[in-house]
Image (spheres, rainbow, N blue to C red):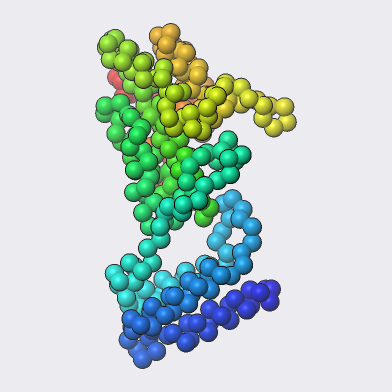
Amino acid sequence: MSNQSQRSGHRIDHALQACDPVADGAPAGVGLDAALALLVDTIVNEPRPAARRRRRLPSRARLALALVATVASLGGGAALAAKLFVPTRTGHYPAKWTFTAVGPGELLNPRGTNFRAVMRALSREVSYPTGYGVWRERVSWWADPPDTWLPIPSGEIRGEFAASAFCAWVADWRRQVTDGSQSAAARDAVVISGALRWKIVRAWDPHPRTSVPGDNGSTHPSQFGWMIPYIQAVGAGDLRQVNRLIAGERFSGDFLMYGQPVPSLKSPRVILTGRRFLRYLDRETS
């Protein structure tokens, strides 16, 4: 352990000893306030290493959070919870040159107390077909709990809803064509044809293309360029081509639907894509 880490640990120990809320065997409100204030001050002002994606919380912060949780279990109740409210909105934005990789918009704290509510608010500008409301709800499971301590651009979340909605509109178009509801299918086709002009899509991918350069001479679609073949197939009324496109998606492809979460799994993010997704759609329309 480095001297810096030892000094940090000693400061936390001294802070707890000086502000022990249960020194006399019963929780004390003033002690709780003082201890938490000093802990927060220690955490915030401690130098931190450069952030790396998907890293674990530094042991110093994990220890402090565990201590806070222990203090909370001893007493303080709702008043303590209110003092520990963590805002989701940060007021900070990513550098413009990072938009292609991470998306635009305000950086959000995925561990914020109201993160789920903020996600729902960001989805309101995205329109889903009638009867597909559960698809909107399932997008929120994408970050339950968020597997990161790094901020997430609001544009990334909005883009996730936009992609989900696009898939829902294509799925509904497919259903209407299969059922012979040509007028409803035509209405869906109009929405699908304009997907690349959605505000959310244009903010992240103003010039969508089916092929852009990747690593080691590879190519891949731009952020929303994968929509283009589906738009073309729907515009041509080609159901077989839509089916081929869906079936051709590899696992974790872009055309997907979030399935029912499985509590027994470490991650609740269950994905239907490719042929499995196509079979699901077939069952829904049969």
Q: Is residue 208 left or right of residue 74?
A: right
28 lies above or below 242: below
Q: Percent from the top left, x then y, of residue 145? A: 43, 52
Q: Percent from the top left, x then y, of residue 65? A: 47, 69
241 lies above or below 135: above
Total marks placed = 0
Q: Percent from the top left, x then y, of residue 243? A: 44, 17
**Nearer to us in this view, 57 or 178:** 57
66 lies above or below 149: below
Placement of the C terminus among the 4 image quadrants: top left
- Residue 68 seen in this snapshot: yes
> Going by the picture, which residue comes out furthest to the bottom?
24
| Residue at image location 42% in from the left, 13% down from the top | 234
| Residue at image location 37% in from the left, 47% down from the top | 118
- Residue 242 seen in this snapshot: no
Instruction: State which quadrant residue 31 falls in.
Output: bottom left
**Nearer to us in this view, 235 or 281:** 235
| Residue at image location 40% in from the left, 35% down from the top | 161
Q: Percent from the top left, x then y, of residue 7? A: 62, 79
Instruction: State which quadrant residue 94 falls in.
Output: top right
